[in-house]
Amino acid sequence: MAAILACLLLTALAPLPARAAGTVAVDVGHGLWDSGAISARGATEFDFNLNLARVLRPVLEARGLTVRPVNFDGEIESLQARVDAAAGSDFLLSIHHDSVASFKLTAWNWMGEDLDFADEDRGFALFISHRNPRLEESLACASAMGRALRARGFVPATHHGTTAAGTPRPWADEENGVRFYDTLFVISHGAMPSVLFEAGVLKHRDEELALRDRSRQQAMAQGLAEGLAVCLGEPLKAEGQLPGPRN
C-alpha cells in the first residue's frame, strides 16, 4: 500500500502527458439483472465495477478524453445493447472484477453469512479478441494500459491460461498482462478497438479489501487513463505478427 501511495504522489506532481482526443465508451460490467461474481465478503461484482468506473471517468476526462458511460445505471440487459450503446466511440473499455473456478473455493462464514473465498489467484488482466476488426489497436492500447499499471505497482494475473471448459486463452502480451479471449461478446462484436479489464480477484480476501480502497482505485484509474491517452493520442503499432485465433 505504501508503494501505491508513493506512486499516487508522484502522479500528482508529474505533468500530464500530451492530451489525447477521442471518445472512450466505459462499460460497467454486469448490472441489476446479473450482478456478476460475489466477493469473499458478499459484495456484488457490479458494485465494484461501478465504483471503479466512477473513479475512472473524471481521470479520463482530465486527460482530454470524452467518456461515453455505458450501463452506469445497471439497466442494460443484453450484451448487444452494450455494443450498440458504445457505437461511434473511438475505444471501448469494459470494466470487470474476477472470480475463480468453483473447485478452488473454500467455505467460510463472514459476519454470520455463509460465503466462500480463494486466496491463491490475484492480479489484473486485460483481454482482447481476434474477432475484433481492429485487433492491432486493441492490443496496442491493452499493452499501454498494462504497462502503465505495472509502473504503478500493479501485478498481472497468471491464472487465466484456460477457460473453465479448457479452451486456451493464450498470451497476447505476457509482460503487460494481456491475453486473447475470443468469445467475449462485448470486445468482439463492436467496430471500435475494445478491451475487457479485470481489475482483480474478488474471491481473494486480501485483494478484495485492496480493491475497495479508494486510493488504490485512483492509482488504477490513473494507469488506465495514462495508457489510453498515450495510445489514442499517438496510436501505437504492435510489433511483429499477431498470433492466430484459437478455437
Image (cartoon, rainbow, N blue to C red):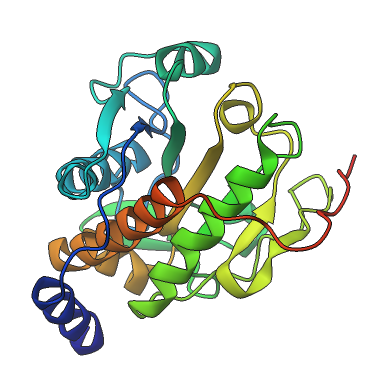
**Quarter of the figure that contains the C terminus:** top right
Query: Is residue 149 shown above or below 102?
Result: below
Left or right of 220 on screen, residue 150: right
Left or right side of 244 for 212: left
Residue 207 position by quadrant: bottom left
For residue 26, above or below residue 235: above
Q: Is residue 227 visible?
A: yes
Which of these two is toward me, 2 or 129?
Answer: 129
Q: In front here: 53 or 207?
A: 53
Q: Position of residue 103 (x, y in %)?
A: 66, 58
Residue beneath the point at 33% across and 74% down: 206
Name the spot of residue 237 as percent of width and height, x first. Answer: 63, 55
Image position of 198 with respect to 14: above or below: above
Q: Residue at x 41, y 29 (%)?
A: 30
- So how many labels did they put on this image? 0
| Along the line of sight, the residue nearer the viewer: 132 or 136 | 136
Q: In which quarter of the image is the N terminus?
A: bottom left
